[in-house]
Amino acid sequence: MDHTEKSFNRPSPASPSGRAVALLDARYLRWIAKLEEHDSASPSVLSRERLNELVQHALNRAVGRVSLLRVYWYADSDDRLVCNDQALRLLPSADTDGSALVRQLTADVQALVAGGRVDVILIGSDDDRLLAVMESAKLAGLTVCVLADERAQAMPRLMQQDPNWARLLREADRRVIVRSSELAHSLGGQGHSPSDDSPSEGFEEALLNVVKAWWDELTDDDRDGLKEELPELRGLPPEVDRDLLLRGKNAMGRALNFHEKRLLRSQARDVTLATSVEPPAV
């Protein structure tokens, strides 16, 4: 009897369990797998056949034993692949600022919450515009996880290098870590393995020069309009975004990759918001 009582009184595992769904942005996964060094004009096709197995194992490590029901794959081109327990969500190729991705992913998370048949959602994105829907899902009782590579294990450093991504990771219930090399192998790529994936100081300065040149060419009215508009936006106005990406492409002699675009946009916001209008002299 004592043995029976001991077995019943053992503490149950703290890790949640149940059914899970993953919502993964193809561009984000390409970036954290360090596959962005391929030609941006014709990037290699990612293979999704082994993705569910990788995600299942990563969830089991981070959350506990769950059943992965489905992976939603958000991409701007149809790879023509047919994979079990996966759903392709096609996005417009002109979605340079990620707004269409945020809208579609938000709608899918809301539908999963309303359905009430999922316990865990795994988000593969670094867009902090998803914070609101993540919080709604958490308040509805779901465990919300964010997929990341090994950089998420050094959060103080990441908070300095990429504060928006770090903020999203900190708001998740769990950070599901997959090594970039492991993800690259699963997606059928080789990736690259520098010790630090963040841009070098010289590269950051080159992009900042692009932003400063753009800012200097704006009229006073355009500057004032941006100063008023940007605080209400997460990204940049579409016309500004297109102009900066073209300038960056011309300056670098190639299309910018995922991380470089994010850095350029962040610098543009910083330059705009840091330049305040001086009050008139009394």
Image (tube, rainbow, N blue to C red):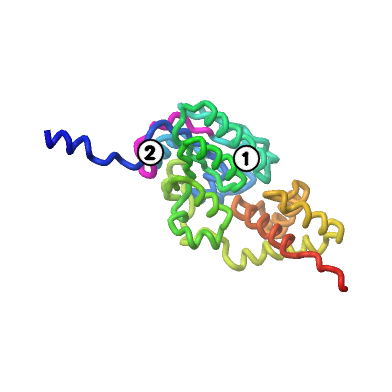
Residue at (55% x, 44% y) in the render: 125
The local crowd at label 2, few if under 14, some if 14 to 19, many if 20 or more residues have their Cα within 10 Å, is: some
Does residue 69 sit above or below 63 in this rendering?
Answer: above
- Residue under label 1, please give it: 102
First in sequence: mark 1 vs mark 2: 2
Q: Secondary structure at mark 1?
A: helix
Residue 184: image location, x then y, percent: 46, 46
The CA span between labels 1 and 2 is 26 Å
Q: Name the side, left or right, on which 215 lies relative to 270.
A: right
Q: Name the side, left or right, on which 85 lies relative to 261.
A: left
The local crowd at label 1, few if under 14, some if 14 to 19, many if 20 or more residues have their Cα within 10 Å, is: some
Residue at (53% x, 54% y) in the render: 166
Residue 65: image location, x then y, percent: 35, 36
Q: Which residues are magenta?
A: 61-72
Q: Name the side, left or right, on which 244 lies relative to 196.
A: right
Tell me if residue 271 is in the magenta stretch: no
Residue at (12% x, 33% y) in the render: 1
- Give the image quarter of residue 9: top left
Q: In this view of the protein, which residue sits in the foreground, 218 or 220?
A: 220
Residue 104: image location, x then y, percent: 62, 34
Residue at (58% x, 45% y) in the render: 131
Amino acid type of disc 1? Val
Q: In this view of the protein, which residue sits in the foreground, 179 or 272?
A: 272
Q: In this view of the protein, which residue sits in the foreground, 265 or 40?
A: 265
Tell me if residue 63 is in the magenta stretch: yes
- Residue under label 2, please give it: 16
Does residue 194 sit above or below 105 in this rendering?
Answer: below
Q: Secondary structure at mark 2?
A: loop
Amino acid type of disc 2? Pro
Q: Name the side, left or right, on which 77 lies relative to 231.
A: left
